[in-house]
Amino acid sequence: MVLFCLGCETIVEVDPPEYDSEPVVTSFFSPDSIWSVTMHRSLGITVKRDATREYISDASVRIMDGSNMVDILSYQGNGRYVSGTGGSPSYGTQYTLQVDFPGQASIQATSAAPSPVVISDYSIEYRPPEFDIIPVSRYQLKIVFSDMPGINFYRIGVYRRVRNQYASDETDPDSVYRTISFDGLTPGWSCGYFTDIADPIDPGGGSGLSCGEFVVTDRLFDGKDYSWSGTTLNVSDEIGKKELRLIISSLSEDYYKYFQSLERNVFHDPLIEEPFPMHSNVNGGLGVFAGYTNTNLILPMPSNN
């Protein structure tokens, strides 16, 4: 006799492996802001606990310059440690973050805020509206900056102060910075960090890419003066302050690699791809301690006459 079992299934429960929690450090520092570090303990994917309960509040956090003490950070709540003296980093200095926990080994991470970008020339030119229906204009921006020898990483963003629609105080109506998108970019720039730095970078250069923040390495212009240009997408003539704020940032390699791995995980397809390993430069834990330096340029929007 033959027996058939239709729709039968066997459920086997498998206990997940034990997960060893690790301290996670997050700190992006620049000369524009005071020292600040956020710390929490990592949670395994199967661990069901309130993440806010994993903030680390009993650590000793120090910023070192070699053997010299630079600053001691004090706990402010929500896992955040801040300079009690209002101290801020300087560019070009290799800092070490040192964290001690009761009964545990210390963790360390080292990084520097790169030197600011030196802009040697810049311009902004008016371009007439492409359509007459909506009063919008376009502006072509150009900057020339010097690149230092070696591998360097840059980010450019352009912003405009516009009205805060949620604010009740009208004393400073144009109080919110809004990102301005570009097209017609100089070849070599990537929209965000989602690019493999081992390959030549040329996604979307000059192809009408619409993006608000661009990133590049200096592989194509190492140690030379470099000219960047792009044209804004339609900018309203009626609202917002009549100027654009361009910010070009020099990024540490750890800063670049961390956001690159973050974006890869955001955009990866979980059905066909494994999660991408998150970049970390923290010894004895997870996370990132990375510097960057901003250079600001205010560009008055030229008249359309």
Image: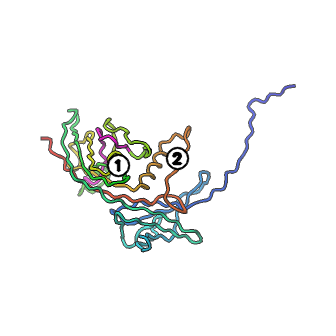
Q: Which residues are magenta?
A: 173-191
Q: Which residue is mark 1?
A: 218
**Quick one: SS at disc 2?**
loop
Residue 1 vertical position relative to residue 303 in the rendered view, above or below: above
Residue drawn at point x = 62 percent, y = 51 percent:
46
Q: Nearer the viewer, residue 198 or 101?
A: 198
Label 1 Cα crowd, 10 Å radius (few <14 / some 14-19 / many 20+): many
Q: Amino acid at mark 1?
A: Asp
Q: Position of residue 83 (x, y in %)?
A: 40, 70
Residue depicted at x 42% and y 59%: 290
Q: Of circles 2 and 1, which is in front?
A: 1
Q: Are marks 2 and 1 in contact (CB under 8 Å)?
A: no
User: How far apart are the two marked residues, 2 and 1, measured between alpha carbons?
Assistant: 25 Å
Q: Where residue 242 appears, x then y in whole percent?
A: 20, 49
Q: Is residue 95 visible?
A: yes
Which of disc 1 and disc 2 is earlier in sequence? 1
Residue beneath the point at 54% across and 68% down = 106
Quarter of the image with the N terminus in it = top right
Residue type at mark 2? Answer: Phe
Which residue is label 2 attached to? 276
Image coordinates of residue 293 in percent, x first then y, are 34, 58
Point out which mark residue 33 bears: none
Write down the quadrant of residue 273 in the picture: top right
Whether residue 161 appears in this view of the structure is no
Q: Is residue 260 left or right of residue 168?
A: right
